[in-house]
Image (cartoon, helix red, strand yellow):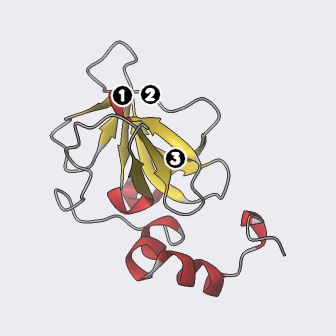
Amino acid sequence: MSEHDWSNKSEQEWREILGDEAYYVLREKGTERPFSGKYLSCDKDGVYRCAGCGQKLFEAGHQFDAHCGWPSFDKAIQGSIDYVKDSSHGMTRTEILCSQCGGHLGHVFDDGPTETGQRYCVNSLAMRHEDDE
């Protein structure tokens, strides 16, 4: 199996790659505590990549402070996100997944303050920031 064959990784392989906290978010659809993530406020340039597979997800310039407790973006990089109806916890939301490895990132809402009207609410543990070079 190629190291980049994301769809065929065992749960044990994912746990070894990610560590317990990121595994909980990306593979078990968990959520980090609000206001605890390291990317809650990041005013750097660059991109945010999936912590599971490294795919580019969001450009840093699309991040904004939504005061919701998680990093928020108004636009994803085209083709990087899969959208799934989520009816858990007694509500209907749109879950966002990395389109390459299927990792759970968070949810997207239609209440964003910018012209896109979108608020991608993302767990910091599901991403890593990469500076422009």
Q: Give the SS element for disc 3.
A: strand
- Circles 1 and 2, Cβ within 8 Å, touching? The answer is yes
Residue 87 vertical placement versus 31 (above, below)? above
Q: Rounded to the nearest whole Å, what is the CA distance between mark 3 and mark 2?
A: 12 Å
Q: Position of residue 130 (x, y in %)?
A: 41, 47
Closest to the camera, between mark 3 and mark 2, is: 2
Q: Which mark is residue 62?
A: 1
The mark that comes first in sequence, 1 or 3, is 1
18 vs 14, left or right, is left
Q: Rounded to the nearest whole Å, what is the CA distance between mark 1 and mark 2?
A: 6 Å
Q: Position of residue 14 (x, y in %)?
A: 60, 77
95 and 16: which is toward the camera: 16
Q: Give the SS element for disc 2.
A: loop
Q: Which mark is residue 96?
A: 3
Residue 123 vertical placement versus 3 (above, below)? above
> Callout 1, which amino acid?
His
Total count of labels? 3
> Callout 3, which amino acid?
Ile
Which residue is labeled 2 in the image?
75
Residue sticking out furthest to the bottom: 12
Residue at point 41%, 68% (across, down): 30
Residue at point 19%, 62% (across, down): 36
27 vs 43, left or right, is right
